[in-house]
Image: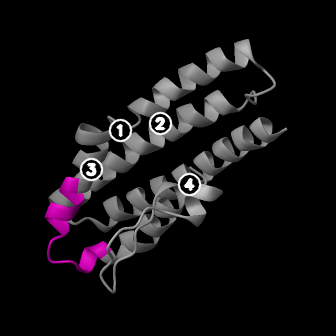
Amino acid sequence: MLGRGAAAAHPPSVPQAPAFRVTRGLAGLVEFERQLPEWAARDDLEFLASYTWQCIEKFGTGGGNFRTLYAAFLCAARAAVPDLVDAAAPGLAARASAQWTALAGALRDLGQNRSREASERGRRAVCEIIALETRLFESLAARAAA
């Protein structure tokens, strides 16, 4: 998730167009946050925002659903092996869950009305997801490496 290690050094081969770059994990979220303000100028904004919120909320993670499940798992893991799971980890996952759902809602609104406010809400949610998930996964990685 952090985009480090052997998998990051040797990503799968993906054909790329000159202006197209594949990103994933937190690096993908950083790139998404960078590009989101540019969406307002796109002719296909309604489709793009609608499809993206549906990927998050319907087709993908159920909004924050997977992070909610992960928070519950982290609570159980902390009880079983407290050396591996920081006390803050379940809360970080739960807060990230809420932000994923907020992002999906902002994108839904953006697709419906091209609102600058919805775009800004989406950008704030992505920034918060990046901050929360960076803290979460760095903490988990540090404890696993110890």
Query: Residue placed at 25% from the left, 60% from the top?
Result: 110
Q: Is residue 23 left or right of residue 46?
A: right
Q: Is residue 106 left or right of residue 141?
A: left
66, 37: nearer the viewer: 66
Q: Position of residue 11 (x, y in %)?
A: 49, 63
Q: Is residue 71 magenta?
A: no
- Disc 3 marks which residue? 53
- Disc 4 marks which residue? 130
- Pick the quarter of the image with the C terminus: top right
109 to 114, vertically: above or below = above
Give the Cα distance between marks 2 and 1: 7 Å
| Tags 1 and 4 touching, CB below 8 Å | no
Give the Cα distance between marks 2 and 4: 12 Å
Query: Residue placed at 52% from the left, 40% from the top?
Result: 96
Q: Position of residue 100 (x, y in %)?
A: 42, 44
128, 10: nearer the viewer: 10
Label 4 SS: helix
Q: How was the colour assigned to the protein in this rendering?
A: one colour
Magenta stretch: give its range: 39-51
- Disc 1 marks which residue? 63
Q: Mark 2 or 4 closer to N-term?
A: 2
